[in-house]
Image (spheres, helix red, strand yellow):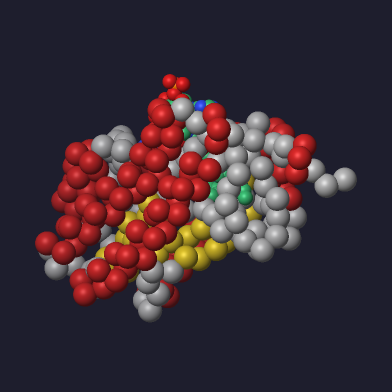
Amino acid sequence: MAREFLESFGGRVFALPMTIREPDQVEDFVAKTNQEFGAIDVLVNNAGGQFPQAALDFSPKGWNAVIDTNLNGTWWMMQSAARHWVANKQSGSIVNIVADIWRGMPGIAHTCAARAGVIYLSKSVAVEWAPHDIRVNCVAPGCCESNGFGNYPPEGSATFQDSNPMRHAGDEWDVAEGVVYMAANSGKFVTGEVLNIDGGQQLWGDPWPTGRPDYFRIS
Ligand SMILES: CCCCCCCCC/C=C/C(=O)SCCNC(=O)CCNC(=O)[C@H](O)C(C)(C)COP(=O)(O)OP(=O)(O)OC[C@H]1O[C@@H](n2cnc3c(N)ncnc32)[C@H](O)[C@@H]1OP(=O)(O)O
Ligand SMILES: NC(=O)C1=CN([C@@H]2O[C@H](COP(=O)(O)OP(=O)(O)OC[C@H]3O[C@@H](n4cnc5c(N)ncnc54)[C@H](OP(=O)(O)O)[C@@H]3O)[C@@H](O)[C@H]2O)C=CC1
């Protein structure tokens, strides 16, 4: 479906079912994409997700699933793309989709830990890989209306509208335009940065993916 949508704009699309959690599948995907197009200009790590749960209830399997997808998977993609760029003496640009982690993420603490990891991983390799002309940035969405909202109980998603001083959710286009700014020539002097696209959520707002516990209600 995504493939047909993208092809409707007239571009050439290469798609392969895979999971970013398996380094071998990642390497295969990146190598085949390189073969197909001759080079990768931009890597956008958008794949990710989590489930809402009180941290006290996290099981080892649930914790590992979220860390493996959001931190490890993102890393395998970054490393594989960068190795190809360096080996082929090509420049590159990475944009990692993270989240608005700045005041913590009660109700999804596992993903908060993973995204914080990605942000500081990105800052570290932005420096290490600058000599190879590889830029590494992040985009941190606040609550943006997407299919993903369906993964939250109604009492959780109802709080997303209160998640920022604008008192409404963003949309996918808000995020997409930020990604293009970071990835394209417009961002040529930007690396190691995080662009928050959150309606001001890092300053004010009260989203609770599990639903807001009574303790935190202000009458
Ligand atoms: C300030 C505040 C700001 C708050 C700001 C709020 C912002 C929210 C806005 C939205 C942000 C988004 O990211 S929107 C994008 C939303 N999309 C998603 O979240 C996609 C959701 N799903 C996934 O990505 C994946 O399923 C993922 C969670 C990583 C798990 O991958 P797997 O396939 O390996 O896992 P599963 O087999 O499904 O489950 C593995 C284990 O995980 C646990 N598990 C899985 N789902 C579970 C569930 N619903 N409830 C409990 N536990 C669960 C169980 O232990 C499972 O084991 P068993 O018990 O043995 O089965
Ligand atoms: N919407 C929001 O408010 C926010 C979203 N984000 C993040 O933005 C990104 C996009 O989310 P959004 O569009 O809302 O949600 P979606 O759930 O619609 O999109 C998540 C995408 O990630 C893919 N994916 C998940 N796990 C893997 C994996 N192991 N390997 C390969 N692909 C995988 C899914 O593929 P498939 O469908 O095939 O499973 C799906 O296409 C995610 O990282 C999300 O956490 C961050 C903050 C807020």
Task: Name the residue furthest bottom.
Answer: 189
Residue 144 shows in this picture:
no
Question: Residue at the spot x=30%, y=50% of the render?
Answer: 75
Q: Where's residue 104, x and y in %?
A: 57, 52
For the C terminus, give its image quadrant: top right
Task: Name the residue furthest right.
Answer: 219
In the foreground, 214 or 101: 214
In the foreground, 114 or 88: 114
Question: Residue at the spot x=65%, y=59% of the render?
Answer: 201
Residue 181 shows in this picture:
yes
Task: Name the side, left or right, on which 203 lies relative to 48.
Answer: right
Task: Name the side, left or right, on which 69 lies relative to 176.
Answer: left
* In the depicted structure, whether residue 141 falls above or below residue 15: below
Q: Where's residue 180, x and y in %?
A: 44, 64
* In the depicted structure, whether residue 2 falls above or below residue 177: above
For the N terminus, give its image quadrant: top left
* In the depicted structure, whether residue 67 falls above or below residue 183: above
Question: Residue at the spot x=76%, y=40% of the render?
Answer: 215
The quadrant where residue 108 appears? top right
Q: Where's residue 192, x and y in %?
A: 38, 69
Q: Where's residue 207, x and y in %?
A: 67, 47
The quadrant where residue 131 appears? bottom left
Q: How many labels does the image show?
A: 0
